Amino acid sequence: MAKLEICAGSVESVIAARNGGAARVELCAALEIGGITPSKGLIAQSRQVEGIDLNVIIRPRGGDFLYDEYEAACMIEDIRTCKQLGADGVVIGALTADGDIDTALCSRLVAAAEGMSVTFHRAFDMCRNPQKALEDIIAMGCHRLLTSGQAATAHEGIPLIKELVQQACGRIIIMPGCGVNSYNAAGILQATGAVEIHASARKSVPSGMQFRHSGVSMGSPHNDEYARKETSEEEVRAIAKEIG
């Protein structure tokens, strides 16, 4: 049976992922910008959910993956916090200005995470040479690579993902992710030879607010302040059934 990882942004979503049959969650804040490091409180409370592994994204901000020394220091400190709180793993990634893996910084992050599982995230999908990047990621000691195959979705990226699985030859887990759902997960696994898969499996949840002040936004004027995205236990269960 292939392992299913779910991207979760709240304790509610972690519980839904566990109840739906996921093996692991990638805990993030601000999923609308691709995910950044969640708060200490969210990590601690999510760790209290039994029966599911907890990996935490280490990403100090949205945008590109070119980080300065201040951001690097934040990332190392966040990894230490994750370790102290009992997370099973961390999810890292950084690039150089030329589009290569920032092996100097990432090696420091891997060293800080000693004893934990390390996944290299989709910064990989923005690099210039995926074959070389994969070798760099393996050499640094990462255990897993999350990738859409440098395409808009994992389904579109099947050709490269398959190539990466073959190149890795068991040295690292290649985990397809992005646009994965209950309709395509099994096909992606079969076409690529991957043994793990990553999905968001989210649904819109309406706010419980009775009083609603229209015309005011806390962010983008296009955001609905009275709805949020949470993991759907039903969709997780459907994916798990398809890949089981």
Image (cartoon, rainbow, N blue to C red):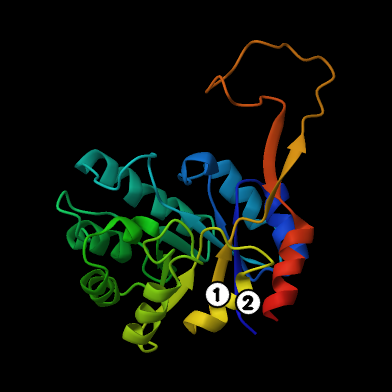
Spot occupied by residue 197 in the image (x, y as percentages of width and height): 55, 71
Q: Residues within 10 Å of mark 1 (few under 14, many from 20)?
A: many
Question: Could you tell me how far apart the alpha carbons at marks 1 and 2 are, in whole angstroms?
Answer: 5 Å
Q: Hey, which residue is sitting farthest right in the picture?
A: 210
Would you say residue 143 is visible in this rendering?
no
Would you say residue 101 is visible in this rendering?
yes
In terms of image quadrants, where is residue 133?
bottom left
Spot occupied by residue 116 in the image (x, y as percentages of width and height): 44, 69
Q: Quadrant of the C terminus?
A: bottom right
Spot occupied by residue 42 in the image (x, y as percentages of width and height): 60, 44
Res 188 label:
1
Q: Residues within 10 Å of mark 2 (few under 14, many from 20)?
A: some
Res 12 label:
none
Looking at the image, residue 92 sits to the left or right of residue 184; the answer is left
Residue 185 to residue 181: above or below: below
Number of labels in the image equals: 2
Q: Are marks 1 and 2 in contact (CB under 8 Å)?
A: yes
Q: Secondary structure at mark 1?
A: helix
Q: Amino acid at mark 1?
A: Ile
Looking at the image, residue 164 sits to the left or right of residue 212; the answer is left
The residue wearing badge 2 is 186
- The structure residue drawn at horizontal position 70% and vertical position 60%, both measured from the top left corner, is 17
Residue 134 to residue 216: above or below: below
Towards the viewer: 116 or 166? 166
- The structure residue drawn at horizontal position 40% and vertical position 82%, both measured from the top left corner, is 165
Q: Amino acid at mark 2?
A: Ala
